Image (cartoon, rainbow, N blue to C red):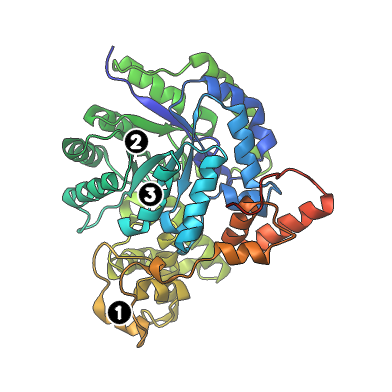
């Protein structure tokens, strides 16, 4: 028997987010939790990313309660979440006291593995979350947001991985959010990391361009320890490769896979009916399951491309799509080659639209791009084009050092502000992350006189 390869099941989080905009309510997947728990996964990714926002915004669920219920139903499997470093679950940087308390509470409520990334791969933006994870006794998975550019060399990635190890990472994750990494590139990247750092490597990609299956095989050949997959009915397209298919292929190649086939079959049968419901009601559109090789030409993530199209359609300018797609890589280069992941993908996309429609580049600039040029998102992979930066800043000051160092603590004041409404620190954290949504949720809960959250309001 060959080397062991482990699996992370993504149906509860990323597959759910990528295919059906995170709309799975707890009751829909609850009947399968026991089966997932028995299947032998390394971990189940079930929280973070958009799940928190969608629970409050659309599903009338307390995300913390969801986590506790999953924990109770899955005592044997590690639970994993995705955290945007200093952005936590949001789109801009938060003060350190919020980041620390959020991580602490996530672990207290049942989280085992926290996958921490930064949209610019600026490790200074990951440091506080990494340390808080280690302090809480959970597994910190230091993550590379994979992108290709003239400045993203193997040496640079290896250097980043070493820094993440210094910060306490127990595993390294390579996160290819748009599915653009090729089989040779992943082979070289995994080999380079394995040569310099002795940590398990987890690979996360998407089937968007169709490269994911050969990429996983080459990655495993180069020594990847863990792969992210989705149970077959929720696999493919903008989601991950299928769990059962990868298990089959790896076993044939002589690797050891500990997954229980009876459990994965049961899961597949169950989630097939769920998928069909979402196809029938239009939540799951056929395009999400298709292969899209355009991303390889334009190096634009699939989700970003559909956002651009929606935006242009709303502005009655869909005929400018080609120009916008050609402008996007130029904006990305001007901005110092940020990886295109939340929130930089949105920022770069909107700017490309503005540049094309305004008839003059950087005449119209979003407040996010201004903040980005002031340094509020961290250090960019390459310097921002100085002339463009000057034009955008128009005399504004650039932040020196780590932006979060300039932010005042927020937790204590929010606790006071929410007295009578918040029942616990989890409520306070939800409010800081999504004020309006959390307030509406807490008010509705008060009306219903529910009594779910019984934790102490203020800790010592
Ligand atoms: Co993903």
The answer to which image quadrant residue 256 occupies is: top left
Q: Nearer the viewer, residue 310 or 7?
A: 7
Give the labeled residue for mark 3: 131
Measured in 3D between alpha carbons, the distance from the residue under mark 2 to the one under mark 3, in whole angstroms, is 20 Å
Furthest residue in direction top, as rendered: 1
Q: Residue at x 31, y 18 (%)?
A: 255
Q: Where residue 346 sits in the image (x, y, percent)? A: 45, 63
Which residue extends farthest front? 460
Task: Return the residue found at the far bottom.
Answer: 395
Which x, y percent locates residue 281?
69, 42
Q: Residue 230, relative to residue 168: is it above or below?
A: above
The image position of residue 270, as x and y in percent, is 62, 25
Decide: few, some or many residues near mark 3? Use Cα within 10 Å; few <14, some 14-19, many ≥20.
some
Identify which residue is drawn at 31% across, 70% down: 401
Residue displayed at 29% across by 15% down: 254
In the picture provided, is 123 more to the left or to the right than 412? left
* Tag 2 and tag 1, C-beta contact below 8 Å: no
Judged from the image, the quadrant occupied by ligand 1 is: top left
Instruction: Look at discs 3 and 1 and give the one toward the viewer.
Output: 3
In the image, is 336 to the left or to the right of 53?
A: left
Residue tagged 1: 388
Residue beneath label 2, please? 202
Secondary structure under tag 2 reads strand
Residue 275 in the image, given as x and y percentages of width and height? 61, 34
**Residue 67 — which label?**
none
């Amino acid at each position: 028997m060959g080397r062991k390869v482990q699996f992370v099941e993504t149906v509860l989080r990323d597959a759910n987010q990528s295919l059906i905009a995170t709309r799975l309510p707890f009751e829909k997947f609850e009947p399968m939790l026991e089966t997932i728990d028995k299947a032998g996964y390394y971990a189940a990714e079930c929280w973070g990313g958009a799940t928190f926002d969608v629970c409050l915004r659309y599903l009338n669920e307390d995300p913390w309660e969801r986590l506790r219920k999953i924990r109770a139903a899955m005592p044997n499997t590690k639970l994993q979440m995705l955290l945007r470093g200093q952005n936590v679950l949001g789109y801009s940087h938060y003060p350190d006291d919020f980041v620390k308390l959020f991580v602490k509470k996530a672990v207290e409520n049942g989280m085992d593995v926290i996958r921490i990334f930064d949209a610019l791969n600026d490790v200074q933006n990951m440091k506080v979350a990494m340390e808080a994870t280690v302090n809480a006794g959970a597994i910190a998975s230091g993550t590379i947001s994979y992108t290709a550019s003239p400045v993203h060399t193997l040496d640079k990635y290896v250097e980043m991985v070493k820094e993440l190890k210094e910060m306490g990472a127990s595993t390294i994750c390579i996160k290819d959010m748009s599915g653009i990494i090729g089989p040779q590139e992943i082979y070289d990247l995994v080999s380079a990391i394995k040569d310099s750092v002795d940590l398990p490597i987890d690979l996360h990609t998407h089937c968007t361009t169709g490269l994911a299956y050969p990429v996983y095989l080459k990655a495993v050949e180069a020594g990847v320890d863990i792969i992210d997959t989705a149970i077959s009915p929720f696999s493919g397209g903008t989601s991950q490769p299928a769990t059962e298919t990868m298990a089959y292929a790896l076993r044939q190649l002589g690797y050891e896979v500990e997954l229980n086939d009876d459990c994965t079959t049961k899961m597949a049968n169950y989630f097939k009916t769920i998928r069909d419901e979402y196809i029938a009601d239009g939540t799951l559109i056929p395009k999400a399951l298709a292969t899209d090789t355009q991303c390889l030409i334009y190096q634009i993530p699939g989700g970003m491309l559909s956002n651009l199209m929606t935006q242009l359609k709303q502005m009655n300018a869909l005929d400018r799509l080609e120009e916008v797609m050609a402008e996007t890589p130029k904006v990305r280069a001007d901005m110092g080659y940020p990886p295109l992941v939340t929130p930089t993908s949105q920022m770069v996309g909107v700017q490309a639209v503005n540049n094309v429609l305004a008839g003059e580049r950087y005449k119209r600039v979003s407040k996010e791009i201004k903040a980005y040029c002031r340094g509020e998102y961290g250090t960019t992979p390459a310097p921002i084009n100085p002339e463009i930066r000057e034009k955008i800043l128009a005399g504004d000051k650039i932040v020196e050092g780590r932006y979060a160092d300039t932010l005042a603590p927020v937790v204590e004041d929010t606790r006071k502000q929410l007295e009578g409404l918040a029942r616990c620190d989890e409520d306070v954290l939800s409010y800081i992350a999504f004020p309006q949504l959390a307030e509406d949720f807490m008010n509705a809960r008060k009306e219903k006189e529910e009594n779910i959250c019984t934790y102490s309001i203020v800790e010592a």
